[in-house]
Amino acid sequence: MSRNSRRPDAPTTPALYAMVQTGLEPVAADEITRDLGGQVKKIARGIVVFKLNEITPDVIKLRTTEDVFLLCWGSNSLSYRPTDLDNFRKWTANRPDWNQYFRIHHAIRPKTKGKPTFHLVCQMQGEHAYKRYDAKDALVAGLGGKIPAGWQPADQNAWLEIWLTIRGKTAVCGLRLSDRTMRHRKYKEDHVLASLRPTVAAAMVRLAGPSPGMTLLDPMCGAGTILAETIELSRQRRAGRIEVLGGDNDPNAMFVTSQNLENVGPAHLARWDARRLPLATASVDRIVSNPPFGKQLASLDEVGPLYAAAAAEWNRVLRPGGRAVFLVMEQEALSGPLTANGWKATRQLRVRVLGQPAVLSVWQKPDEPATMPGT
């Protein structure tokens, strides 16, 4: 029996939803479908709703999602009026089978020593005729008698968390299965300025599609997050090693990268200038990078020359037919030199990084033209 098959007489599992960085919903949906065999039911801004025939600990091994929840209830037709509060209470009290939900949670997150702890979270965006604390009070009222006696409320590191998230006319209530390590990762002990979010790095690596035996390069590796996510992807698939190369011109970044990768896996690291890479021509299969944004440099005028010089090196070291994935704010400054080398943009996703709009783009380098006989 496959991991996602189910006996005809088995109880129906509840739906789940993943919280995702805005713009990465299609990538997360692809991971849920391909890696978990899930069925994506709905995609909204920052949320992917899906179903699994069997909910196992694999669900909290997703790399492109910030958090995963059991879906208790959801609505996309809030009135913005106080009548919403009564609905929050009724939906919380009546819609979920809380005993079933708690059993699933306990199987994914076994209880540690001591009394069980719980925490209720309410997040709200938009203008409503009620406050966030009013919505949380409605959630508390709906949970009356549902949480077992003896469980202790806790503000930090609670074993069980129930979230109510309100965005405009949409509200969703969920029982959290993941913890903070899903979005922050255990390996990331050190950071550099504007360090890339691990879930974004994981999405970039998935879009690059490295296969066993390939070589992947991050020429401006910062804290090494892209390198770490490549190694983790290779380990999860257990299909063979991906060779990982990374470097940066900042000695502190190289130190941070080496520290973060210490418990992840092997990578070839070097301090270098990304405009003059010490690599052989056509020696890498994939390039994945988050080059410095204009806001990280002394002047926006520096971005164009930097990207142009780096693009010349990327073109030199990437094999014909190779693929590259970049995350930048100044997309025009990047696309100009890449298209000048004949590269084609195959996909673009608009995301937000550090609160700023950015573009995640996938590029294909053309194959070498066929050599004509007699030339």
Image (spheres, rainbow, N blue to C red):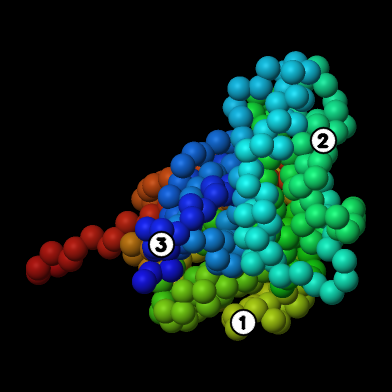
Residue position marked by numbered label 3 in the rendering: 6
Residue type for callout 1: Gly
Whether 210 is drawn above or below 364: the answer is below
Which SS class for mark 3? loop
**Image quadrant of residue 63?**
bottom right
What SS does tag 1 mark? Answer: loop
Rendered-image quadrant of the C terminus: bottom left
Neighbour class for label 1 at 10 Å: few (<14), some, many (≥20)? some
Name the kind of residue labelled 3 in the image: Arg
Q: CA distance from mark 2 to mark 3?
A: 35 Å
Asked if residue 341 shows in the view, the reply is: no
Q: Residue at x 9, y 69 (%)?
A: 374
Quarter holding the N terminus is bottom left
Element under disc 2: helix
Q: How many marks?
A: 3
Q: Which residue is mark 1?
A: 265
What residue does disc 2 label? 141
